[in-house]
Amino acid sequence: MAKAKNRTDGTIEKLANIADSLQQLHQGKIMVVFEMDSDQYKNACEKMKVQDASRFTIDISGTDFIFLLTEDE
């Protein structure tokens, strides 16, 4: 996880804290969805060092954080 910390300016640690808190509320599969406009999504892709696709998922201790690009209306 040290590698991820250097790449994401603390974002992974923040998501891990959220995952820990959610797991205290509910035992089982947890999914958190972030729906973002193109600027927010591009920023998230850059922080997480992922290819610019329409969605990506990060699994932290059994909690899925799903990042989705909102389609323009």
Image (tube, rainbow, N blue to C red):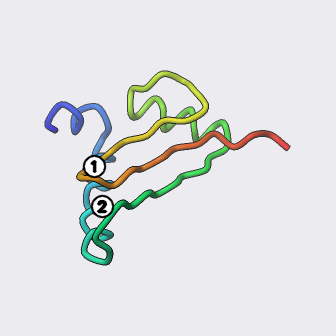
Q: Quadrant of the N terminus?
A: top left
Location of residue 29 (image quadrant): bottom left
Left or right side of 65 for 25: left
- CB contact under 8 Å: marks 1 and 2: yes
Q: Is residue 24 above or below residue 46?
A: below
Location of residue 26 (image quadrant): bottom left
Type of residue at label 2?
Ala
View extreme (top): residue:
51
Residue drawn at (32%, 45%) of the image: 59
* Count of numbered marks: 2
**Secondary structure category for the residue under label 2:** helix
Where residue 48 sits in the image (x, y, percent)?
Answer: 38, 33
Q: Is residue 45 above or below residue 59?
A: above
Residue drawn at (39%, 50%) of the image: 64
Q: Disc 1 versus disc 2: distance between alpha carbons?
A: 7 Å
Where residue 35 sits in the image (x, y, percent)?
Answer: 61, 50
**Secondary structure category for the residue under label 1:** strand
View extreme (left): residue:
2
Q: Which residue is mark 2?
A: 19
Q: Earlier in the sequence, mark 1 or mark 2?
A: 2
Left or right side of 52 for 15: left
Residue drawn at (48%, 38%) of the image: 44
Type of residue at label 1?
Ile
Tell me, for residue 10, which label it has, or none: none
Disc 1 packing (10 Å; few <14; some 14–19; many ≥20): some
Q: Which residue is mark 1?
A: 60
